[in-house]
Amino acid sequence: MKLLLCCVLATLACAQDQHPITKRQIAPVMGEGGADWLTRPEREAEEHPEAALQEIGIPKGATVADIGAGVGFYTLRLARRVGPTGTVYANDIQPGMLDRLKERVEAAGVKNVIPVLGTVSDPKLPANAIDLELLVDVYHEFSEPEKMVRKLREALKPDGRMVLLEFRGEDKDLPIQPLHKMTVAQVRGEIEPEGFRLAKRSEILPRQHILIFTKKAMP
Ligand SMILES: C[S@@+](CC[C@H](N)C(=O)[O-])C[C@H]1O[C@@H](n2cnc3c(N)ncnc32)[C@H](O)[C@@H]1O
């Protein structure tokens, strides 16, 4: 019991509440209580998910990963876009979110989704295997952002892309809690030192940045 308590305290002590480079305050993880918010009817109009995926470009037959997939709002759309010859890894750290995601995948009759329970520092994806990693409204919740991004880089193929959608931190009027928004400068300041470069920035969405990163050589 004493050992267990020590381990829990050690884990809590390791958790960062600020990003070491930008000093951005890390947001708390959305719990299962927020699951219904992820499928709220007005989300389509607020976020234009199909336009986002069209803009990113999701090739048929691709192997993609929905990181922090929640209940699968994007997973199902990705599964349709990659088609039966493609694969979607649906990653999250909360088993309850993944249970709901599995129910939705089953109800939709979708066969090409592989749910993956990750940890806060490791998405548990195969190495060098992913064409595209999609992170919608999740990066700002990573409690171990540097470790996660390193692992995400390892999982990407050499020409793979890592795509972040984040609510615009530059827009003070956006009705989203400040900790759950990010500026482009914050995202670049944190992601690029981990061996990525911003290959494309798109602002076609009403509320979110689309930021597409590719790998650059590490010294
Ligand atoms: C705001 S929700 C967004 C869910 C989904 N991307 C969507 O757009 O509907 C954030 C999700 O990220 C997950 N999450 C937080 N930290 C994570 C991490 N380190 N690795 C994987 N998932 C994480 C949470 O459990 C939660 O399900």
Image: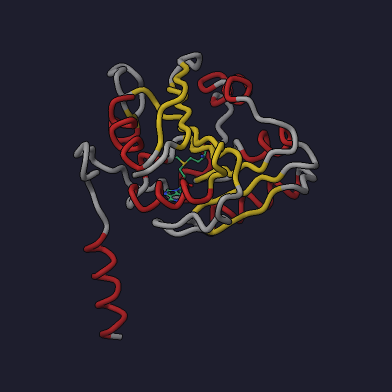
Q: Nearer the viewer, residue 20 or 7?
A: 20
Which quadrant of the figure has residue 13?
bottom left
x, y percent for residue 140: 35, 39
Tell whether 46 sits left or right of 110: left
Q: Nearer the viewer, residue 127 or 143?
A: 127
User: Count the marks: how many?
Assistant: 0
Quick check: 112 above or below 165? below
Tell whether 135 sits left or right of 188: right
- Residue found 37% across the figure and 47% down from its top: 142
x, y percent for residue 167: 39, 26
Q: Quadrant of the N terminus?
A: bottom left
x, y percent for residue 11: 29, 66
Q: Nearer the viewer, residue 145 or 94?
A: 145
Quick check: 50 above or below 204? below
Quick check: 93 above or below 165? below
Instruction: Give the image's coloring scheme.
Output: secondary structure
Q: Quadrant of the C terminus?
A: top left
x, y percent for residue 98: 58, 54
- Residue found 62% across the figure and 49% down from its top: 89
Q: Nearer the viewer, residue 87 or 108?
A: 87
Which quadrant of the figure has residue 178?
top left
- Residue found 51% across the figure and 20% down from its top: 46
- Residue found 29% across the figure and 25% down from its top: 185
Quick check: 18 above or below 80? below
